[in-house]
Amino acid sequence: MSYLTPVQHAADERIRLEELRSKVLSDEDRGITYLDSEKEMALPEAGFQLFQKYAEQIQKWGWIINNSSTSSHSFKKNMNILRKQGRVVTLAAVPCILGVDLTGKDLTDFIQQLDESDGSSSIPAAVLRILNYKACRGAIMFGDPLLPSECSLIIEELKATSLCFQCAHGRPTTVPIVNVASLRRQLARLGAPGGRSEAEEPWHGLSQHEASLERARTRLRQLRRLRRGTL
């Protein structure tokens, strides 16, 4: 057995996220759930206008709303001032994403998202949340043993993703590894200017110095000259 390193979970999560996203955007693993009992929603006037403006995008995802200009007396009687100034709509169905039903609250969030992006947001935030969760829960866990062939397959699949350097939650999927001592030796073999040895040649300002009182005095003098603008 072998291990891909702790980033194996993040790498597999990114691969799964893009697979799930592709399926959902192609209408696979995506459907509509009709409510057993329709729910009335009160939208402020501005929200109702936005709903009408973006009705096509809203319905495309599976929210089905019956627009009613009037409502029952019992419902109207309990509406507050804000609701009285708005409109009442009836929610008949909601999107079902990977087996998870969205809600009326997700709809209002999507309307606000569309307003803030001037209609350019193609995927509701609630859908992204479900995709991220499903990708995370289905990914290889940290420390799971893997065969070298499985590690190679993950790397190849990760290379084919659109955002290969981070997982669904922003964690890095790759870890740069640099052996500084080995790198310095390789640079020295390429030829140090002036014929000086590796030990004598400052390595791009990163040469190591032993801690000493004299070294501290030197650094202090350099800082003072720097503040005076003479360095």
Image (cartoon, grey):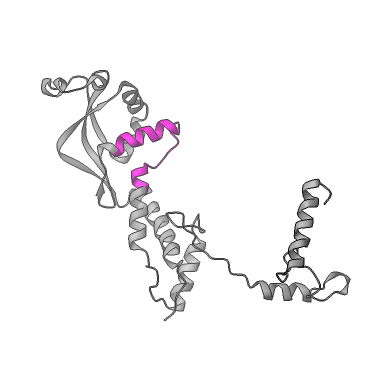
Q: Is residue 119 magenta?
A: yes
Q: Quadrant of residue 35?
A: top left
Q: Quadrant of residue 91?
A: top left
- Whether residue 63 sits left or right of residue 111 in the image: it is left
Return the residue nearer the eye: 84 or 157. 84
- Whether residue 69 sits left or right of residue 127 in the image: it is left
- Whether residue 110 sits left or right of residue 222 in the image: it is left
How many badges with numbers are in the image?
Answer: 0
Q: Position of residue 220 (x, y in %)?
A: 75, 57
Main secondary-structure element of the magenta-colored stretch: helix
Q: Quadrant of the N terminus?
A: bottom left
Return the residue nearer the eye: 174 or 229. 229
- Whether residue 79 sits left or right of residue 15 in the image: it is left
Q: Position of residue 217 (x, y in %)?
A: 76, 62
Q: Position of residue 7 (x, y in %)?
A: 46, 66
Which residue is drawn at the image coordinates 28% and 40% (left, top)? 62
Which residue is drawn at the image coordinates 40% and 33% (left, top)? 114
Residue 23 visible: no
Give the extent of the magenta segment.
106-128
Q: Quadrant of residue 65?
A: top left
Return the residue nearer the eye: 74 or 114. 74
Q: Is residue 106 above or below residue 25?
A: above
Which residue is drawn at the image coordinates 45% and 77% (left, top)? 149
Name of the residue lying farthest toward the left: 74
